[in-house]
Structures are given as structure tokens and as C-alpha cells.
């Protein structure tokens, strides 16, 4: 029988790539999204032909009967994401992400899907790294530390810390899988992340070209590798909960060098205008991937040049519109 999966946040960046891959694998896929950020675009339409799409806001309980049938796995991706949103409305981020997790878990309790995947974030480990409780690359086993609770952007990390904790409390009922995404990128990722933002400005011919925090480093992971790891983790047979970083540890890169690669793809050479990094942004982010390697034999396959080129080409074909200017 075909695998049945539910993906919350399924119209978003990771959710839709995940749905596409699962549909290709022959799974029956149901997407749930409130479309606050997920897009009802041609990419969603293409998946919709082979998957069910349900519009629902998870800050309210899932009504009985609205999501029908049993599921082998539930991927919980729905969340308010993005530094800008956390800075502008930390209460909204905390409230939405915590309520969404609580309502999803309540719904699952009555249906017992085999596996439950939570999309968490590298940011849950930022506090421990910043306070010197661990060294890079950052492993999963660091304690949760909120280094600056006054900073609005800490609302996002806190919401994921709470969600991870709530998921882990259910490990006697479900196969709990927590994937901490580290800087995932690729086509259709919105416009408020460093890669699409650089691409958009390079394509628009911005000169001077602003770079905030040029010496900070990140290790970017292509969406295809992230999807592979997400599905692999969720399908793992072990009953024990698994918490794993999902990322690419092979090509840590300075933000300035990333900008230069994007500018080279666009064929432009503007003057660079370097300024301080955004407040609260970590100088470095690099995942330790031994859990994924040990459990799945995972190795990231898409190198940055290849992934960046494909992402650049996608954005060149999908230029930003006024409708995208709400922080997507
Ligand atoms: N992309 C990354 O690099 C990254 C890094 C760390 C963590 N994550 C996590 O992965 C998940 C997916 O991220 P993404 O990059 O695809 O973001 P995204 O914004 O593209 O997707 C999130 C989806 O959740 C939906 N959503 C938001 N609030 C909702 C609600 N109340 N009810 C129902 N749906 C709701 C949005 O409409 C959107 O489609 C998120 O949980 C995010 O925190 C992503």
C-alpha cells in the first residue's frame, strides 16, 4: 500500500519540495497550510494534481473530519519563520509556532501516525555556541540556552525549543524525529533570505551592493539534500527519538565570498558597501552531521556552485513582484 503522509506548512519552501519528492516516490500526500506565507503558485498547482491541499490555520485546532484517513508519517513544518518577522512581532512568532505544535500533537494523539517529524532549526543551538558551552561544528547534544531573551529574534529559537520539548514528550507514542535545518536554500525559498536577496539585488543591478557582516560564515545546504535527510530520518525504523542536524558541513563560506559568487553569476561588478552584521546574528554556523552519517549514511551531494547556479536561474525566471514584498 502507498505510504500516506501529511505535511503541515506544505505550501512553503521546504514543504513543497518535500511534497514533490514524496509524490514522486508514490506516496499519497496531504498538504495543510494557512497560506500566510505559502504560495498558491504554479509549483503548488503542479503538486496539487497529485496531492490533496487543505487550507487551515494551525493556531486553531484541526476540526474533526477535515483531514481524513490514517497517516504513516506527519511532517510538521508549519511555522512563522524569518528574522524580520521575529524582530517585528516576536509575540506572533511565539504564539503561532507553539499553538501550531500543540494543535498538531493533539490531533495526532487521536490518530497515531507512525512517525512524527518536526522541522527545527540551528538557532536552538546558537545560545550554547555563543556562551562557549560547545565548539564548532555544533553538535545536537548542546543544552538549550537563550543567550539574550530581550532580543525579539530569540522568540523564534524559543518557539522551536518548546516544540522540540513537546515532541520529545510524545516519544512513547510515536517515532519522534527532529531535524534541525541549517541554512537550507534552493528555488522558491521566498525573498527574505541572504541567497535570494543577493540574487535579486544582483539581477536588479544594485550598485553599491550592500553586504551586512561580510566576514560571518555559513554552510549552505541545498534543498534536495535536506529533503533526502528529512525523509530518511522519518522512515528510520528505530522507536527511539532521533534529533539530527540537517545541513552541509563541506563548504563553509564567508558572506562576502557568497556575494561575489552571486555577482559573478549575474555578470556584474558593483562596488561593495560593507556594514555591520544584523544584531544578534551569529558569526558562524556549521553543523556537526555525525548523527545523520551514522543513521543514514548521509552525505550532502549538491555542491554550492551547482546549487547556487540552479537557484540563481530559478530566480532569474521568477522575478520578485509587489505581491512578494510582504516579507516572503
Ligand atoms: N529554510 C530553512 O533554512 C530553515 C532553517 C531552519 C528551520 N526551518 C524550519 O523549516 C520549516 C519550513 O521552513 P520554510 O523555509 O519552508 O518556511 P516557509 O515560510 O516557506 O514555510 C512555512 C509554511 O508554514 C505555513 N504556516 C505558517 N503559519 C501557519 C499556521 N498558523 N497554520 C498553517 N500553516 C502555517 C506558511 O504559510 C508556510 O507555507 C519551518 O518550520 C522552519 O522553522 C527552515
Image (cartoon, rainbow, N blue to C red):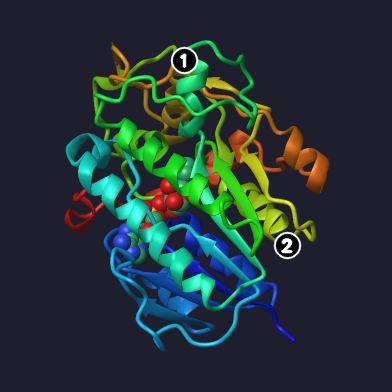
* Quadrant position of residue 180: top right
Q: Is residue 276 left or right of residue 229?
A: left
Give the numbered dot on residue 235: 2
Q: Is residue 65 left or right of residue 178?
A: left
Q: Which residue is mark 1?
A: 130
Give the numbered dot on residue 75: none
| One can see residue 100 in this view | yes
Q: Is residue 190 left or right of residue 107?
A: left
Per the image, label 2 sits on a secondary structure element best described as: helix
x and y percent of residue 248 in the render?
A: 64, 34
Classify 10 Å Cα crowding around label 2: few (below 14), some (14-19), many (20 and above).
Answer: some
Q: How many marks?
A: 2
Q: Residue at x 74, y 52 (%)?
A: 240
* Residue 105 sits above or below residue 183 on the image: below
Q: Nearer the viewer, residue 123 or 307?
A: 123
* Residue 156 sits above or below residue 260 on the image: below
Q: Nearer the viewer, residue 115 or 206?
A: 115
* Quadrant position of residue 191: top left
| One can see residue 312 in this view | no
Amino acid at each position: 500500500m502507498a505510504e500516506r503522509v501529511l505535511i503541515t506548512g506544505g505550501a512553503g519552501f521546504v514543504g513543497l519540495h518535500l511534497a514533490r519528492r514524496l509524490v514522486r516516490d508514490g506516496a499519497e500526500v496531504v498538504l495543510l497550510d494557512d497560506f500566510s506565507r505559502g504560495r498558491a503558485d504554479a509549483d503548488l498547482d503542479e503538486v496539487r494534481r497529485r496531492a490533496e491541499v487543505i487550507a487551515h490555520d494551525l493556531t486553531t485546532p484541526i476540526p474533526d473530519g477535515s483531514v481524513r484517513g490514517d497517516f504513516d508519517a506527519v511532517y510538521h513544518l508549519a511555522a512563522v519563520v524569518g528574522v524580520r518577522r521575529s524582530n517585528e512581532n516576536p509575540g506572533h512568532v511565539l504564539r503561532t509556532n507553539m499553538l501550531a505544535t500543540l494543535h498538531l500533537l493533539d490531533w495526532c494523539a487521536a490518530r497515531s501516525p507512525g512517525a512524527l517529524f518536526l522541522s527545527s532549526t540551528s538557532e536552538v543551538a546558537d545560545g550554547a555556541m555563543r556562551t562557549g558551552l560547545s565548539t564548532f561544528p555544533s553538535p545536537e547534544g548542546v543544552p538549550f540556552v537563550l543567550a539574550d531573551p530581550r532580543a525579539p529574534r530569540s522568540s523564534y529559537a524559543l518557539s522551536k525549543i518548546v516544540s522540540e520539548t513537546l515532541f520529545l514528550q510524545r516519544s512513547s507514542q510515536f517515532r519522534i524525529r527532529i531535524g534541525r535545518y541549517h541554512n537550507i536554500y534552493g528555488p522558491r525559498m521566498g525573498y527574505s533570505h541572504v541567497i535570494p536577496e543577493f540574487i535579486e539585488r544582483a539581477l536588479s543591478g544594485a550598485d553599491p551592493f550592500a553586504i551586512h557582516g561580510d566576514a560571518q560564515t555559513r554552510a549552505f545546504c541545498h534543498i534536495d539534500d535536506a529533503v533526502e535527510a528529512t525523509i530518511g530520518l522519518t522512515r528510520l525504523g528505530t522507536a527511539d527519538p532521533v534529533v539530527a542536524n540537517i545541513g552541509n558541513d563541506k563548504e563553509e563560506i564567508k558572506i562576502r565570498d557568497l556575494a561575489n559568487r552571486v555577482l559573478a553569476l549575474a555578470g556584474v561588478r558593483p562596488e561593495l558597501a560593507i556594514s555591520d552584521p544584523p544584531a544578534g546574528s551569529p558569526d558562524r554556523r556549521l553543523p556537526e552531521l555525525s548523527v545523520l552519517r551514522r543513521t543514514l549514511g548521509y552525505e550532502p551531494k549538491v555542491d554550492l556552485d551547482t546549487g547556487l547556479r540552479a537557484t540563481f536561474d530559478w530566480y532569474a525566471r521568477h522575478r520578485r513582484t509587489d505581491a512578494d514584498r510582504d516579507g516572503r
